[in-house]
Amino acid sequence: MLVIHFSKKTARWSALLLGVVYGKQRFEYLKPIAEEERRVEEAEKKAREEQERIYKQLSEDSDTILK
């Protein structure tokens, strides 16, 4: 039978809890940065879609003039 000493158990649980605390702090630090990146990405996507729509409309208009 395998016997794990109390100090080893305590060290394992301590490491686990420290990892959870660190992960929570890291998540809270990165969350606003990710939100800002998503907001910027959405604005760029809207601008790109608007440019594509204008390009498509202009190309359709030029096609009708040439025909």
Image: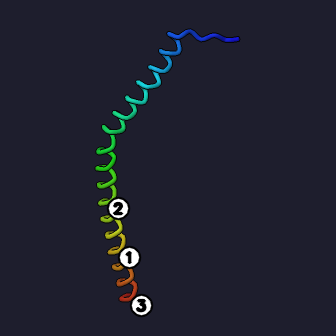
> How far apart are the two marked residues, 2 and 3, measured between alpha carbons?
33 Å
Tag 1 or tag 3, which sits nearer the N-term?
A: 1
Tag 1 or tag 2, which sits nearer the N-term?
A: 2
Reading the image, the residue beneath label 1 is: 56
> Looking at the image, which is closer to me, 48 or 26?
26
- Three-letter amino acid code of the residue under disc 2: Lys
- What secondary structure is found at the residue carrying circle 3? loop
Q: Position of residue 55 (x, y in %)?
A: 35, 73
- Image point 32% across, 75% down: which residue? 54
> How far apart are the two marked residues, 2 and 1, measured between alpha carbons?
16 Å
* Tag 2–tag 3 contact (CB < 8 Å): no
- Three-letter amino acid code of the residue under disc 1: Lys
- Image point 28% across, 50% down: which residue? 36
Front label number (2 vs 3): 2
Reading the image, the residue beneath label 2 is: 45
Q: Position of residue 46 (x, y in %)?
A: 32, 65
Q: Describe residue 10's horizontal placement relative to residue 52 as left or right.
A: right
| Res 51 → quadrant | bottom left
- What secondary structure is found at the residue carrying circle 1? helix
Q: Quadrant of the N terminus?
A: top right
- Image point 41% across, 90% down: which residue? 67
Reading the image, the residue beneath label 3 is: 67
